[in-house]
């Protein structure tokens, strides 16, 4: 089972989650800054949460050229494919990937039906809130927690579980529901691209069914436009019905080189627009950059007041090599503190 | 390498292709019957190549109900997912799957760069047209031929090769280009569904990149709505560029239980409309039938004059258990001889 990169990542998130993370510098509500927006700007500006400047102008020029048949930047409708990372690009990813908080909450929920977990690791440590002890049990324990909470149901049942969680769970710092931890400027960008006949896809290292559970309502992105990491499934036939069952075995890790591989497998076109925020998105941006015309965009988390500030040294969403490559290739690097007048939706 | 079902199928097709197939009873051009169509019928009838009758009425009622919010058959737009098998459902599959003819032609093309093949099996037998001798070499030889012709290129390069082949290759019986061996009534059905906000997907046992090469132009179905069998890929980075390379190793067989598994993996919704023509489509139709309202449709190849007649005994596109299940579940079974007034486009 090729769990190494997935579980290494989860391991690090768990490690960081509950006993301190240097990058965690605050997450105050951004609504204070939304007062800067003028009503008439909303009516005419497709990207009202983006401050005027070179970056916003570059995005608008790219889209204006893409739809203008007379422009060298014209892109036929059938090639207008835009891919977005999710964690740290469409919604926040601090202090840990939100899917990990789902794992922990879900273990606690499932414990009612598993009294034996009180004496059984790694469940016992989760139930006791002793995350250091989970860490000490290593990667296998983390993988076990993920599989316990993600497998053994149909995709439809699993999505319902995630939706239920999303309806009550809140972010540990902001107290907001997770589907309000999305970035308002990126919601506007998704809508702006779609209004100009771009197809918007999520290409995320997160679990595909976890994403599909809420992406259609939250982002307007249907399940068949979500590419993510996945576990294997099996086809079950019994006398009266048929269904698909999720198995506790990794199938695909949609991160790093997995992103262009996943894009080819699921989308089958090279994206002309790609947005990410970490080194895990680098290969997706490089792949998109083989298209001309095309635009690549990195979000740089620079806003320690309204969100979080982190890049080269971060264990979550590390943006190190990607920053160098962005400079080399002339990609857009969005300075979230300066380029956005609002971070989260109201 | 799980090549068994894929190569078994290819083996049987090769076996049948060139030394006689009982099911092959003729493939005369169908254009003679198109004279039955009246011009004014075209203007008002969304399915002009379908004869009036219970089957056509059932399709029209299903779609009319699906878009009518007051109907118990109403289906919200976001759930209007329609999946179609390809071989034998959207285009013909006799005397052998057309992709196999591509393999043979491609070996002959590639032989110029491989003079050693004149002395090397299984290539030598292909080059000499001695298909019985290929058969004698077994499954491994067939798999070798498929991988030789399908791997070692980028997806974009491979599609270009298929497109070139499609521009000159012709069907061994009708002499038509293969993209004119599509079924006119099914092209109309695809368009009719799309006109009512259904998303149309191909879910085929054929190779996904082989399909993507021409499905967008021929069917109006973009690459991200094609689910098919696939080989593995790898991400290549060198100093100046990046690309995806196709590897000679099977990744996924999109047939039988692979169809619902592929539908869940790639589409993530249960189709409310599913069409096929063989037992290989049975699980897809059963999966679709778990939705209510929904419609399942089998094409029954009954037309030995205009196309081919085959079902329970056929080695290609066998429809045996599927016919029994169709009766049990009340699925639509299209009698191609009686339900269609035209088979192929002009």
Image (cartoon, coloured by chain):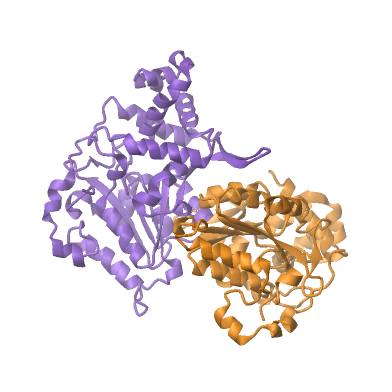
Chain colours: A purple, B orange
Vertical comparison of A56 with B256: above or below: below
Front residue of A217 and B295 = B295
Residue B252 visible in rendering:
no
Residue A90 visible in rendering:
yes
Vertical comparison of A213 with A146: above or below: below
Quadrant in the picture for the N terminus of chain B = top right
Q: Where in the figure is residue A79, as x and y percent of width and height?
A: 44, 67
Vertical comparison of A22 with A279: above or below: above
Front residue of B230 and A100 = A100
Residue occupying image coordinates x 18% and y 42%: A29
Q: Spot the residue most to the top.
A: A119
Residue occupying image coordinates x 39% and y 24%: A108
Vertical comparison of B306 with B313: above or below: below
Q: Where in the figure is residue B26, as x and y percent of width and height?
A: 83, 73
Quadrant in the picture for the C terminus of chain B = bottom right
> Where is residue B107, by image quadrant?
bottom right
Q: Where in the figure is residue A254, as x and y percent of width and height?
A: 46, 45
Residue occupying image coordinates x 66% and y 48%: B283
């Amino acid at each position: 089972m090729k769990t190494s990169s997935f579980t290494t990542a989860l391991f690090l998130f768990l490690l960081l989650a509950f006993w301190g993370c240097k990058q965690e510098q605050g997450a105050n509500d951004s609504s204070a800054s939304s007062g800067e927006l003028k009503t008439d700007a909303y009516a005419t500006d497709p990207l009202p949460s983006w401050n005027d400047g070179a970056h916003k102008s570059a995005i608008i020029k790219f889209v204006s050229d893409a739809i203008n048949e007379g422009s060298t930047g014209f892109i036929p409708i059938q090639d207008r494919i835009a891919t977005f990372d999710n964690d740290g690009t469409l919604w926040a990813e601090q202090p840990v990937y939100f899917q990990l908080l789902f794992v922990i909450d879900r273990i606690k929920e499932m414990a009612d039906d598993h009294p034996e977990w009180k004496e059984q690791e790694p469940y016992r440590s989760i139930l006791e809130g002793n995350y250091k002890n989970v860490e000490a049990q290593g990667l296998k324990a983390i993988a076990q927690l993920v599989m316990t909470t993600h497998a053994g149901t149909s995709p439809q049942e699993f999505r319902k579980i995630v939706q239920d969680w999303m309806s009550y769970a809140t972010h540990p710092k902001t107290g907001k529901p997770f589907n309000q931890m999305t970035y308002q400027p990126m919601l506007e960008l998704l809508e702006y691209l779609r209004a100009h006949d771009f197809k918007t896809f999520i290409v995320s290292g997160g679990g595909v069914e976890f994403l599909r559970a809420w992406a259609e309502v939250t982002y307007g992105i249907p399940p068949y436009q979500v590419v993510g990491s996945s576990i294997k499934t099996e086809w079950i036939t019994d006398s009266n019905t048929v269904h698909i069952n999720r198995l506790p075995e990794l199938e695909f890790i949609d991160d790093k080189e997995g992103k262009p591989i996943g894009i080819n497998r699921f989308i089958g076109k090279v994206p002309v627009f790609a947005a990410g925020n970490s080194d895990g998105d680098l290969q997706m941006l490089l792949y998109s950059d083989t298209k001309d015309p095309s635009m690549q965009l990195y979000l740089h988390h620079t806003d320690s007041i309204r969100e979080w500030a982190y890049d080269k040294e971060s264990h979550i969403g590390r943006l190190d090599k990607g920053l160098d490559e962005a400079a080399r290739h002339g990609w857009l690097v969005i300075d979230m503190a300066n380029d956005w007048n609002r971070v989260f939706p109201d």
